[in-house]
Image (cartoon, rainbow, N blue to C red):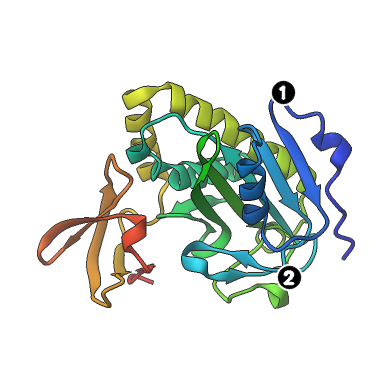
């Protein structure tokens, strides 16, 4: 499989304010983007890598793919919305990635809180980290999208790739442009829209979330599972689960795993 490199010349033609740095190899694009943010990188700075040697997911789970087989990038953002609203960032990102993939012809949906699926298989993961910088707080939004992995190369049996899903290998440069521009546009609208934008995002996210409407098991750090029907996502981005004791809302930071029990 040829697996071409990202086209730096085409990436340089992105919208003003968006600069993409492409690394041949790094430990983690989130780690590099965090360094850039602390050094003063402006909002919209993007770090992409052809290969990660120490990619991380939520709760420090490891994640690795062969060189140039995935789209791996992190975006520096400097939100001005209240800190209480920041937990929406990974949900906003997942929603945008799934919507962009659907627009490109893939049957993608979001799994609460930070995965994108095709069917019941993971196609992309998202990791958002908040950090302090000399110019104020920043967020690093990391996205890993499986592009041309074969079944033998999948990191876990429950994953998939765009190649497996469609039978064709898409252009990673086109995908990167699509996703970065979609994320920046949605993020700007979310920031500027105030409470009404937050409400619209909550409704749109719940409608696109494949977790909502399913029977789930939520594994909590205490070891006690929460089981019931996922009925929605509230205004704070928490998953609402109706169980034997009534409705319980859980945030992403309170959850180890969310698994459907109706498969």
Q: Residue 54 location, x and y as percent?
A: 66, 68
Residue 150 badge: 2
| Residue at screen point 33% across, 72% down | 261
Mark 2 or 1, closer to the camera: 1
**Quarter of image, res 207:** top left
- In this rendered view, identify the residue nearer to me: 232 or 56: 56
> Does residue 60 show up?
yes
Q: Secondary structure at mark 1?
A: loop
Q: Which residue is mark 1?
A: 16
Task: Quote the CA–CA distance across marks 2 and 1.
Answer: 36 Å
Q: Secondary structure at mark 2?
A: loop
Q: Quarter holding the N terminus?
A: bottom right
Q: Residue 99 location, x and y as percent?
A: 54, 41
| Residue at screen point 60% across, 40% down | 76
- Is residue 237 rendered to the left or right of residue 147? left
Q: Residue 219 location, x and y as percent?
A: 31, 71
Q: 243 above or below 155?
A: above
- Is residue 117 rendered to the left or right of residue 167? left
């Amino acid at each position: 499989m040829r697996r071409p490199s990202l086209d730096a010349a085409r990436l340089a033609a992105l919208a003003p304010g968006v600069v993409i740095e492409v690394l041949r190899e790094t430990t983690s694009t989130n780690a590099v983007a965090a360094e850039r943010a602390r050094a003063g990188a402006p909002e919209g700075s993007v770090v992409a890598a052809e290969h990660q040697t120490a990619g991380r997911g939520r709760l420090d789970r490891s994640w690795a793919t062969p060189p140039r087989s995935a789209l791996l990038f992190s975006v520096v953002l400097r939100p001005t919305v209240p800190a209480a609203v920041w937990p929406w960032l990974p949900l906003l990102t997942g929603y945008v990635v799934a919507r962009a993939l659907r627009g490109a012809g893939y049957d993608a949906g979001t799994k609460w809180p930070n995965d994108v699926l095709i069917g019941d298989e993971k196609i992309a993961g998202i990791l958002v980290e908040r950090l302090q910088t000399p110019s104020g707080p920043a967020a690093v939004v990391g996205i890993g999208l499986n592009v041309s992995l074969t079944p033998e190369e999948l990191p876990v049996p429950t994953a998939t790739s765009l190649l497996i899903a469609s039978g064709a290998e898409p252009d990673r440069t086109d995908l990167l442009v699509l996703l970065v521009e979609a994320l920046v546009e949605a993020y700007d609208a979310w920031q500027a829209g105030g409470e009404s934008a937050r409400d619209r995002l909550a409704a749109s996210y719940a409608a696109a979330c494949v977790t909502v409407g399913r029977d789930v098991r939520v594994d909590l750090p205490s070891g006690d599972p929460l089981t019931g029907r996922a009925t929605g996502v509230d205004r704070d981005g928490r998953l609402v689960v109706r169980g034997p004791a009534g409705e319980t809302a859980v945030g992403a930071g309170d959850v180890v795993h969310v698994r459907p029990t109706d498969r």
